[in-house]
Amino acid sequence: MQPIIDANRVRQLFLMALIVLIGLVLFRELAFYVPALLGALTLYILLRTIFFRLTEVRKWKKGPTALLLMMVSLLMILFPVALLLQMLSGKLAYALDHSGELVASLKQVVAEVEARYHVVILSEANINKVGEWMASLLPRMLGATFNSLSTIFFLYFILYFLFTQGRAFEKALVQYMPFRADNVGLLEKEVHSMVVANAVGIPVVAFAQGVVGLIGYWLIGVKEPFFWFGITCIAGMLPVIGAALAYIPLIIIFLANGQMGQGIAMFFFGFGIIGTVDNVMRFTLLRKIGDVHPLVTVFGVIAGLSLFGFIGLIFGPLLISLLLLLIRIYRSEFVAKHGFLG
């Protein structure tokens, strides 16, 4: 008679439970570094071909080559960020120093708009909260800056070892994958295409919106069009509302100042042209680069920002694509041959 409980299966389940438990404990304690890990993986996927060409074809040393690519990538990331911060820093500093005046001006503008158009925009309590929010903005900005610097440091710390030990890392990853070789190749291709599509496509779409917006801002007569160009580029990377975070305030400002013609022009240019650029490029360029479905992009970015912060713009859609791909792999490896439960 066979034993009622298979001892080997018990050991297997116990080992799996132990692995999951230790993994969850480590993930909870190291969750702060997840964005750094994801960022390092993103840069590794984008730069690995160049790295291996330099080290394996041209015989460059791995350490100096890794440091060179890390420096180039850091400059490419920090230059546009520094440019945008320079454009925004003056406005933020002014807002923090004159928060009381800005709240008073906001109350006046809101009162004029409500009286003119017979609508209720904001309550008195909500307007007063704006001042409190602006007063607490500086400490939060300092905390976010420190966290960003820490993330960048650990990102490149991880990236260095990914570069110098990349082949061994990839080989070990393939060996531990519990899939057939063809499905491992499919998974690798999907990850690469999704990372490239989002890491390259999303900033390109946002920059295109910013350029189109800059032309419209200049023609319509927006004050400081380059400042609003920066706002449009940043907002263009966000899901759902996107660049509307830039041109909706401009519409309100024009209408509040009695510039009806410019407000109407901004309305049609924003929703008609800037919004069209977003829809067309986001749903064509991203799909062309990585065959990304629009729904995967939108809902993936929403989930990714909540889970991982800014790097979730890339890995949010990737998570949804991986879920769908894993379902396909499960179906091809188990369901087709053995039925749903084997």
Image (spheres, rainbow, N blue to C red):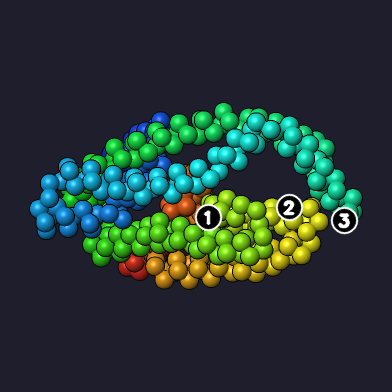
Residue under the image location 26 percent in, 63 percent down: 185
Horizontal side of 110 relative to 19 (left or right) equals: right
SS at badge 2:
helix
Badge 2 crowding class, 10 Å Cα cut-off, few under 14, some 14 to 19, many 20 or more, is some
SS at badge 1:
helix
Horizontal side of 187 relative to 239 (left or right) equals: left
The residue under label 2 is 253
Give the image location of residue 245, x and y in percent: 63, 53
The residue under label 3 is 117
Badge 3 crowding class, 10 Å Cα cut-off, few under 14, some 14 to 19, many 20 or more, is few
Badge 1 crowding class, 10 Å Cα cut-off, few under 14, some 14 to 19, many 20 or more, is many
**Residue 271 in sight here:** no
Q: Quarter of the image holding residue 288?
A: bottom left
Q: Residue furthest left?
A: 59
- Disc with the residue nearer the chain's start (3 vs 2): 3
Horizontal side of 233 relative to 52 (left or right) equals: right
Residue under the image location 48 percent in, 71 percent down: 284
